[in-house]
């Protein structure tokens, strides 16, 4: 089973596009790389050798082929690749340097190594399905420092990038349909009360399988059906202020400063963005197996060494692998130092009180899969010394309720009892929160 826009699975890499076959009709084309060959398919079910593949197209609208790259260049590259001719189009270090050069041309980042980190992150948007987690990119900048300029660059460079408003529909259109890069300017809005649910979904969506939501939708015939929407994928948040704490904790922070230079806007120059994206697609088709194997190897090595653990390792590992596979191992140590320094500002640090709330709920679920608890019930499970002197029972319950919402610990809100708000807690979800914050174990 393959996603129609972008898939890397079991030695297969697939990218899909739509193109106009006639004045009134569009068709889709899938470009598939496996076992050292690149193939084409137009149907949602096809076979390569003894293996049959099914593309889960559904109602997903793919990106237009001609809008993403130069088709004739891609076809020529594939012919040369399949015939064994020497090719320069997808040399990893060359592509890395080309992307990095474009960044330095249009925007000023805080340090030189930031260009290498952002370059690796942008190229990684073509490889992200390989990784169990992919860091968000937080462009943090004062007004007038060029964050819109950087977003314009990322919109051109990243896989199927879409700049959209922070809504669940826009998120699904970008990520579920396109497996694209979701760009949010003015991400300060996520701190507002009516965006709390979206912020929770985004927080979960840095991990494969995270942030999925089941919805009831009507098809073209008016029939209702239950569908599952995927939200895992690369995301960029641009803001002048801090993001919500749990969302910030999943971010690679790229600070911008006010520049003394006058940069041209990316759309003011005659950059051939389609040619550069063509090189990135060629890189995906030729290097996906190498990146996948390197990721598995480095994951085992980092875990065994235990020099970096928990979420910090989850977020660093894709960047480390990408820099290595792109031929940029010479900057790996510098990038690691920079990443660690910036992560200190992004990392969410539990208070002792929050930690005890997690432990209390976790311990209550050790022998049950599901529990309905009011904050007052959790207060009774906690040491009284954790609460400030002088708080009454209601004030203690309010403090616990805030921690539950802040940590996204409950699965849903239960029906209210006569006197109390109650929450549904499920062992699986609480165990994940416990592992992330208390045990610091990568799932």
Image: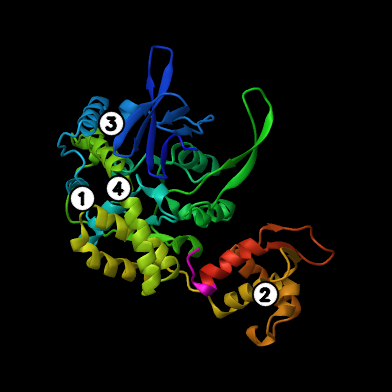
Of label 2 and label 1, which has the lower sequence position? 1
Residue 131 lies, in percent from the top left, at 41, 53
Magenta-colored span: 438-443
Mark 3 → mark 1, Cα distance in angstroms: 19 Å
Q: Is residue 374 left or right of residue 174?
A: right
Per the model, the C-alpha gap separating discs 1 and 4 is: 10 Å
Above/below status of 365 relative to 16: below
| Residue ID for mark 1 | 100
Cα–Cα span, label 3 and label 2: 54 Å
Label 2 SS: helix
Q: Are marks 2 and 1 in contact (CB under 8 Å)?
A: no
**Marker disc for residue 123:** 4
* Main SS, magenta residues: loop
Q: Does 441 lie within the magenta span?
A: yes
- Label 1 neighbour load within 10 Å: few <14, some 14-19, many 20+: some
Give the labeled residue for mark 2: 363
Residue 69 marker: 3
């Amino acid at each position: 089973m393959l996603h129609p826009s972008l898939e890397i699975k079991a030695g297969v890499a697939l990218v899909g596009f739509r193109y106009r076959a006639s004045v009134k009709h569009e068709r889709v084309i899938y470009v598939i790389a496996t076992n050292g060959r690149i193939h084409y398919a137009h149907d949602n079910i096809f076979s390569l050798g003894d293996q049959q593949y099914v593309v889960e197209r559904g109602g997903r609208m793919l990106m237009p082929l001609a809008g993403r790259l130069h088709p004739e260049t891609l076809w020529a590259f594939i012919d040369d690749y399949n015939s064994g001719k020497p090719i320069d189009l997808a040399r990893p270090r060359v592509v890395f340097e080309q992307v990095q050069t474009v960044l330095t041309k249009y925007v000023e980042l805080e340090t030189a190594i930031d260009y290498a980190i952002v370059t690796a992150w942008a190229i990684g948007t073509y490889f992200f399905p390989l990784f169990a987690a992919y860091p968000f990119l937080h462009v943090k900048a004062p007004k007038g420092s060029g964050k819109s300029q950087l977003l314009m660059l990322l919109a051109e460079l990243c896989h199927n990038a879409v700049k959209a408003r922070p809504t669940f529909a826009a998120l699904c259109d970008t990520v579920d349909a396109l497996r694209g890069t979701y760009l949010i300017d003015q991400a300060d809005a996520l701190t507002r009360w009516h965006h709390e649910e979206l912020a929770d979904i985004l927080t979960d969506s840095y991990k494969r399988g995270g942030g999925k939501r089941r919805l009831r939708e009507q098809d073209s015939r008016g029939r209702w059906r239950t569908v599952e929407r995927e939200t895992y994928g690369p995301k960029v948040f641009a803001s002048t202020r801090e993001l919500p704490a749990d969302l910030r904790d999943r971010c690679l922070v790229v600070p911008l400063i006010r520049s003394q230079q006058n940069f041209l806007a990316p759309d003011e120059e005659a950059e051939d963005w389609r040619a550069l994206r063509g090189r990135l697609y060629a890189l995906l088709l030729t290097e996906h197996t190498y990146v996948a194997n390197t990721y598995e190897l480095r994951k085992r090595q980092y875990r065994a060494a235990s020099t970096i653990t928990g979420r910090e390792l989850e977020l660093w590992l894709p960047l480390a692998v990408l820099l290595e596979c792109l031929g940029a191992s010479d900057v790996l140590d510098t990038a690691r130092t920079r990443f660690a320094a910036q992560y200190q500002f992004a990392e969410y640090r539990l208070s002792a009180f929050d930690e005890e709330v997690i432990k209390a709920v976790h311990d209550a679920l050790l022998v049950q899969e599901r529990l309905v608890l009011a904050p007052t019930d959790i207060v009774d499970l906690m040491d009284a010394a954790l609460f400030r002197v002088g708080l009454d029972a209601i004030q203690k319950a309010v403090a616990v309720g805030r921690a539950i919402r802040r940590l996204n610990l409950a699965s849903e809100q239960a029906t209210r009892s006569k006197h109390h708000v109650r929450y549904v807690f499920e062992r699986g979800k609480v165990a994940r929160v416990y592992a992330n914050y208390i045990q610091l174990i990568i799932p």
